[in-house]
Image (cartoon, rainbow, N blue to C red):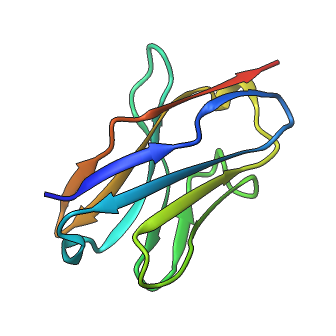
Amino acid sequence: QVQLKEFGGGLVQAGGSLRLSCAASGPTARIDGMGWYRQAPGNQREWVGSIRLNGLTQYADSVKGRFTISRANPRDYTIYLQMNDVKPEDTGVYYCYSAFRGHNSWGQGTQVTVAS
């Protein structure tokens, strides 16, 4: 099973920036794409965005234009979530995931808190 570990959460002021990273290990041949979900207290887990192995990215409307997902290089299974112009509603636990043939593996999550 693919293991995922997130890094980079913390406290940030509204309007500021934060970068999260997620490193995959294990059978990385079982990865078609990677991405991020988040979960605010009392809310369901919400998809944030994803990146395919070919570099194609997709984003939720709520973060489009503010968040960017990237990979360091095509052979690297570390992805980044660059969060700019953050808002209090971006607060939550951010979970990295990897996808393979309809099955997702998950990291344990990292807390992001945006102070107004």
The percent position of residue 91, horizontal first and vertical second, equals: 62, 26
Vertical side of 7 occupied by 44: above or below: above
| Residue found at the very far left of the displayed protein | 1
Quadrant of the rendered image containing residue 82: bottom right
* Left or right: 4, with 61 as reference point: left
Q: Position of residue 77 (x, y in %)?
A: 40, 70
Residue 46: name its quadrant: top left
Left or right position of 24 against 8 = left
Q: Between 47 and 85, which is closer to the camera in this rendering?
A: 85
Q: Residue at x 68, y 56 (%)?
A: 64
Task: Describe residue 114's horizontal placement relative to residue 77 as left or right.
Answer: right
Q: Position of residue 55 (x, y in %)?
A: 51, 80
Q: Is residue 108 above or below residue 60?
A: above
Which residue is nearer to you in this view: 116 or 23?
23
Could you tell me residue 13's position as x and y percent? Answer: 82, 27
Task: Farthest residue to the right: give it.
Answer: 15
Which of the image's four quarters has the C terminus? top right
Q: Is residue 103 above or below residue 43?
A: below
Q: Quadrant of the N terminus?
A: bottom left
For the point 51% across and 44% down, the residue is 7
Residue 21 vertical placement versus 90 (above, below): below
Q: Residue at x 84, y 38 (%)?
A: 16
**Residue at left offset 44%, top offset 21%:** 43
